[in-house]
Amino acid sequence: MGRYHAMNFVIPAVFEHLKAKSQVLVNGVVSFKCVQCPCIVQDFETLKTHIKSHSKESDFVCFVCDKLLSRTNILIDHIRSVHQKIRDFSCHLCKGTFSTVYNLREHMNIHTASKKHVCEVCGQAFVHKASLNLHKFSHGTPFTCNHCGKNYANPLTFKTHILENHSNLPKYVCDICGKELKTKSILQKHLVVHSNERPFVCPICNASYKMKKHLSHHHRQRHVNSKSQF
């Protein structure tokens, strides 16, 4: 992974999450299982060292949420922004803060790009035409909810409000994190995230994954010449 490993950017709270997640009981002894392969070690420091050994692999797995990422720098940015909530890139023109320099550069377009799209009603200018079209809703007749009386300028926001608050569609709620899912099957797939179950096992190297798509990705990256299919 170059000079710096993603593990070097992890704060203690995330390490505690990894420690709890990787704990297993082997013959009555508390041990730690790697989330990327079947390896089991007896102390957490050894596990942290072992995780770095995966740096030469082409599929980088976030040890917090199991998300697959293609490159080391993307994995580091993912850990910093999603799990550590680090936002140390600041815009000098406003109070905006961002987790990566790329996001900051994208934001700077708001301040530096030419604002060619002008609202004929109020004169406010926008960089993108889509932003102007969205703004135009603020000058129109508001969409009023017949159920609760709330007003919305944007029809998409109004539709989302109806679906989330006044829809008769059944909602399946995860009793662990409270997330609402549309169908029972989606809820069942979601519950795997909260368990230690890794039912999808590679028949070639025994690496295990929570989701079939992660196993398929692993197979394409690591065993591309194998005849085994998933």
Image (cartoon, rainbow, N blue to C red):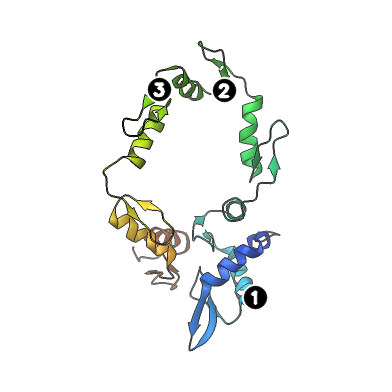
Picture quadrant of residue 174:
bottom left
Count of residue discs: 3
Q: Residue furthest front?
A: 148
Report crowding for label 1: few under 14, some 14 to 19, many 20 or more residues within 10 A (C-alpha).
few
Mark 2 or mark 1, earlier in chain: 1
Residue 107 rendering spot, x and y as whole percentages: 62, 34
Asked whether, in this view, residue 28 is left or right of residue 76, the answer is left
* SS of the residue under disc 3: loop
Q: Which residue is mark 1?
A: 45
Mark 1 or mark 3, earlier in chain: 1
Residue 1 rendering spot, x and y as whole percentages: 64, 60
Picture quadrant of residue 162:
top left
Give the CA distance from mark 2 to mark 1: 50 Å
Q: Which residue is mark 2?
A: 127
Mark 2 or mark 3, earlier in chain: 2
Q: Is residue 196 above or below residue 92?
A: below
